[in-house]
Image: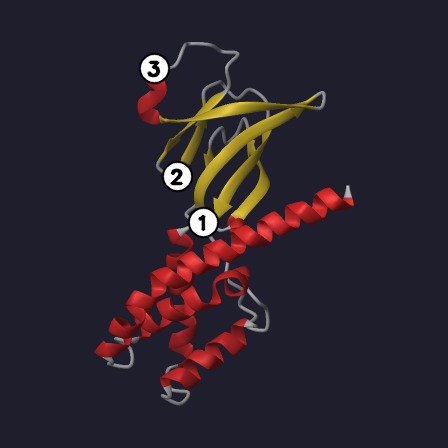
């Protein structure tokens, strides 16, 4: 289902004509952030490269990063992992220049060594979806959690269409929809792994 179709279905359900269609799209984006905040969905799991440079020895994770899972470099075919700690843990760490670790201060990621040359690291993180401006696309969240997103949008739209009962009706349906989507996603992930094993 494309984003345009999803918005159209919400509009049809609300039966308010086209007067609130622009608001629906905004509420869909807001609802998506809420649903992605409830669970670390697999489509949010991204691997990317970050660089600590001499000019900029820290990295701003931006508000789109929900959680960082791992940081590592590859040397001679071996993954060398850095340790990600909270700032409050710094006093408990050994003063070891060979031990690479990072700490977060708000959104800023700091290395524990003096950056005297550019240092690129692989990062595995959960990132909130950047929703497409092209409504002809199908966001991953619609694919894996359409019902949950639908209920959250309808809850968001209650005040817009001045229907207090709308949110009350959909609120108890949200959590079961999220749990069902998580279960389906887990089954798809297992199936994907099995197919990969068979292919190997």
Compared to 104, does 11 lie above or below?
below
* Residue marked by disc 3: 92
**Gap between marks 3 and 1, in whole Å?**
30 Å
**Residue beneath label 1, please?**
64
The residue mark sitting in front, 2 or 3, is 3
Real-space CA distance between mark 1 and mark 2, rounded to the nearest whole angstrom: 10 Å
Name the residue located 53 percent from the left edge and 76 percent from the top edge. Answer: 4
**Picture coordinates of residue 70 (x, y %)?**
52, 32
Callouts 2 and 3 close, C-beta under 8 Å? no
User: Sequence order check: which comes first, mark 2 or mark 3?
Assistant: 3
**In the image shown, does 96 or 146 lie closer to the viewer?**
146
In terms of depth relative to the viewer, which is nearer, 94 or 179? 179
Label annotation for residue 27: none
Q: Residues within 10 Å of mark 1 (few under 14, many from 20)?
A: few
Whole-number angstrom distance, CA of label 2 to CA of label 3? 22 Å
Question: Helix or strand or loop: what does disc 3 sit on?
Answer: helix
Q: Which of the marked residues, 3 or 1, is nearer the chain's N terminus? A: 1
Q: Is residue 61 left or right of residue 176?
A: right
Q: Quadrant of the C terminus?
A: top right
**Residue carrying label 2:** 107
Question: Which residue shows up at 42% across the image and 87% down it?
Answer: 18
Task: Work out whether residue 89 or residue 168 is closer to the camera in this orientation and state it.
Answer: 168
The residue that appears at 51% across and 41% down in the rendered structure is 125
How many neighbours does mark 2 have within 10 angstroms: few (below 14), some (14-19), or many (20 or more)?
Answer: few
Placement of 87 over or under 61, stated as above or below: above
């Amino acid at each position: 289902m494309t984003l345009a179709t999803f918005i159209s279905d919400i509009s049809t359900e609300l039966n308010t004509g086209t007067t609130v269609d622009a608001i629906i799209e905004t509420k869909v984006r807001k609802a998506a952030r809420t649903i992605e905040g409830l669970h670390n969905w697999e489509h949010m799991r991204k691997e990317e490269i970050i660089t600590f440079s001499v000019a900029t020895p820290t990295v701003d994770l931006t508000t789109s990063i929900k959680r960082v899972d791992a940081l590592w470099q590859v040397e001679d075919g071996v993954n060398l992992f850095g340790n990600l700690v909270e700032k409050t843990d710094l006093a408990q760490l050994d003063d070891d220049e060979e031990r690479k670790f990072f700490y977060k201060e708000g959104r800023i990621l700091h290395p524990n060594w003096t950056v005297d040359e550019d240092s690129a690291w692989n990062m595995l993180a959960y990132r909130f979806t950047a929703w497409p401006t092209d409504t002809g696309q199908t966001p991953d969240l619609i694919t894996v959690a359409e019902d949950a997103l639908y209920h959250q949008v309808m809850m968001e739209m209650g005040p817009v269409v001045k229907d207090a009962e709308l949110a009350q009706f959909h609120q108890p349906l949200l959590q079961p929809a999220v749990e069902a989507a998580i279960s389906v996603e887990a089954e798809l992930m297992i199936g994907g792994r099995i197919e990969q094993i068979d292919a190997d």
